[in-house]
Image: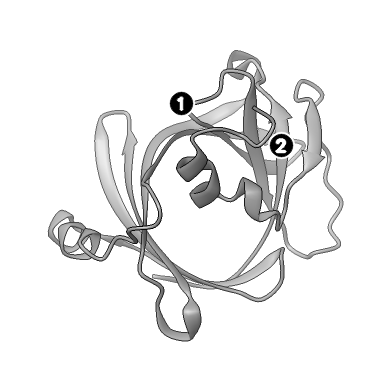
């Protein structure tokens, strides 16, 4: 179980050529939001497929600022996933995305690609502090920062089935 704080920034980017990224992992993710937890925490489960192997992860987040969250995350088994999935929020649709994890200048980036867009993606990076400098990859065109913008949350994107620009 991982308990702690997550400091993360997100950016809307033009779809890069993933062949030119230093990809370490490619994950296919089905993410389902559950009914909110204690203190209105956001709860979700993920079904993650990597190289034919499937694992399940439960996450609970309490938003402290747009960038910082208190987070609890741990792997669960298939039957626990099935037990939790019945608590899915009816106002959110499940999210399908492909995540490319890649390194650039000793930083780990995650690029989320959604089935509804061939031209745009979301790139995120976890930081050690809110003030940490970011060195962006040369071959990724950052359009704008979307950290804390509810129109670009996974739940909003999945429900709309498109980026706000499209």
Mark 1 and mark 2 lie on one chain; the one further toward the N terminus is 2
Would you say 163 lies left or right of 27 here? right
Would you say 122 lies left or right of 104 here? left
Residue at left offset 71%, top offset 65%: 66
Horizontal and vertical percent for residue 22?
62, 25
State the colouring used for the structure image: one colour
Q: CA distance from mark 1 to mark 2?
A: 15 Å
Q: Nearer the viewer, residue 55 or 96?
A: 96
Would you say 41 lies left or right of 9 here? left
Quadrant where the N terminus sits is bottom left
Horizontal and vertical percent for residue 138?
82, 24
Quadrant where the C terminus sits is top right
Horizontal and vertical percent for residue 130?
80, 64
Which residue corresponds to mark 1?
115
Where residue 70 sits, quadrant-wise, is bottom right
Instruction: Say if 63 sits above or below 8 in the image.
Output: below
**Within 10 angstroms of label 2, few (less than 14), some, or many (20 or more) residues?**
many
Residue at left offset 23%, top offset 59%: 85
Residue at left offset 50%, top offset 30%: 114
**Within 10 angstroms of label 1, few (less than 14), some, or many (20 or more) residues?**
few
Horizontal and vertical percent for residue 25?
48, 33
Residue at left offset 49%, top offset 51%: 155
Which residue corresponds to mark 2?
12
Assign a secondary structure to mark 2.
Answer: strand
Mark linked to residue 46:
none
Would you say 34 lies left or right of 149 here? left
């Amino acid at each position: 179980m991982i308990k702690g704080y997550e400091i993360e920034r997100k950016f809307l980017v033009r779809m890069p050529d993933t062949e030119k990224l230093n990809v370490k992992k490619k994950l296919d993710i089905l993410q389902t939001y559950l009914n909110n937890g204690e203190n209105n925490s956001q709860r979700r489960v993920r079904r993650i497929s990597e190289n034919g192997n499937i694992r399940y992860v439960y996450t609970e987040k309490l938003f402290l600022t747009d960038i910082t969250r208190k987070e609890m995350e741990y792997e669960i088994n298939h039957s626990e996933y099935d037990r939790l999935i019945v608590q899915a929020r009816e106002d959110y649709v499940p999210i399908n995305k492909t995540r490319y994890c890649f390194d650039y200048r000793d930083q780990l980036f995650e690029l989320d690609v959604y089935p509804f867009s061939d031209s745009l993606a979301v790139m995120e990076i976890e930081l050690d502090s809110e003030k940490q400098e970011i060195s962006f990859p040369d071959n990724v065109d950052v359009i704008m920062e979307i950290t804390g913008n509810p129109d670009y949350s996974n739940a909003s994107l999945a429900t709309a089935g498109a980026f706000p620009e499209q």
